[in-house]
Amino acid sequence: MLCPAAFSAAWCVNPHRHSVCKSTIAEAVAAASPGDTIHVARGIYREDVVILKPLSLIGEGRYTTIIDATGKPNGIFINGIGASPNAGVTDVTISGFTVENANFEGILAASTDGVTIASNFVTNNNLSLSSGKCPGIPDFETNEGMDCGEGIHLMGAAHSVVAKNIVERNAGGILITDETGPNHDNLITGNIVEWNGYACGITMASHPAAVLAHPVGGMNFGVFHNTVSQNRSGFNGLSSGGGAGAGVFAPGPGAQAYGNVIIDNTLVGNGLPGVAMHNHASVPGAPPITFRDNSVIGNHIRGNGADTEDAATAGPTGINIYSVVPVTGIVIANNVIEDEAIDVSFKSAATGTNPAPQLQAHLNTFERHAIGISNLGGATVDGTLNWWGCPSGPGKHGCASATTGVLFTPWLTTPPDWER
């Protein structure tokens, strides 16, 4: 028996309509069949490109193929929201573009699976802020009035990759949220995320569900099992004082943020701490909060700011974990933290009488004279096997210190092998 073969076509876009090429990206997207590839020549395309089917959109070069979305909501919108036929768009690749000047996101992927966003330059998007609001942002984007969705936004996405992009001078950098569905098993790697003035560099945040009702009323879909790896996130949030290098947030009732990993990143000079994990509200009788098992491993953290408002720290801080509900299963390991007044700050309600430590912090390198671990809540911290800046251990002359509620014996008497 002979089976029919499946073929994909290649399309081209050229603003001068050379040969058989389309003159706009939108024309090529409309003409393409699922699985096709669209090659876009260098030039300036003043469009808001909406993608409703699987395809590859490849620019000639990220500095020469420019989507200028001035006055438009987005530069590129991969839209899997809504009823069939475009519910849950899969297998889209976006590569080789500058995306700039959109009112909201430069690149938005909503209700998608298997998306790749790679080797783009995303800049000067979501800057239409007005008195702390984002006028005209769609109803399905909840909790985003302060940053208009940021440069690149994965919303309700799964099994997707955001890699080797330069994301700079937007209101915020890269945002991972769950308004339209669960956001999970994504990889954010090798990006340079800098000088985004009003929010974090890389944010994983559980937001209230919108447009698609959650099967359990009041529950968020959840942000879980995502990996943020080998990125450089620096100098974010300086215009507002409100941006961490990387963050995990379960802000209120029903929020779910768990099992995420921040590993092997460089987090420097941000307005808030290098890493921030926050929960701010718990309401009796409201849906429970899931905020657990997030890890911060092998990062270089340097010269960031203090946290503010209810999660305030007493000075510049490397990692701040703050929650009004018990946060458990947190691992902080193998990080090098420099030029901070407080290397690790932890404040959480305890899980019960004589509970096991809720934070495991090991094999980290703390700087001399800093507070290595500051425990501000009722929980216990296992801070054994860290290097406190000198062989004598925490609190000794010339060493970093630890507050009460931190277990620190035994400590390392030499720096970790990988640090020497």
Image (cartoon, rainbow, N blue to C red):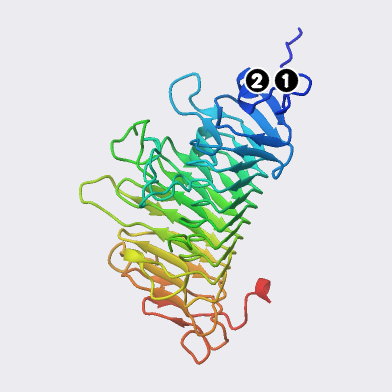
Q: Quadrant of residue 213?
A: top left
Q: Which mark is residue 9?
A: 1
Q: Which mark is residue 32?
A: 2
Give coordinates of residue 283: x percent, y percent. Answer: 23, 51
Secondary structure at badge 1 equals: loop
**Which mark identifies residue 398?**
none
Q: Nearer the viewer, residue 46 or 338?
A: 46
Q: Nearer the viewer, residue 401 or 360?
A: 401
Mark 1 is surrounded, within 10 Å at the Cα level, by few (under 14), some (14 to 19) or many (20 or more) other residues, namely few
The residue under the point 66% across, 40% down is 97
Q: Residues within 10 Å of mark 2 (few under 14, many from 20)?
A: many
- Name the quadrant of the N terminus: top right
Q: Nearer the viewer, residue 342 or 303?
A: 303
Where is residue 15 shown, x and y percent of the image? 70, 28
N-terminal of the pair, mark 1 or mark 2, is: 1
- Residue at the limit of the structure toward the left, as seen here: 285
Name the spot of residue 122 as percent of width and height, x first: 60, 46
Q: Quadrant of residue 263?
A: bottom right
Residue kind at label 2, given as amino acid type: Ala
Q: Quadrant of the C terminus?
A: bottom right
Visible in this render: residue 280? yes
Query: Residue at point 42% right, 35% down?
Result: 180
Q: Amino acid at mark 1?
A: Ala
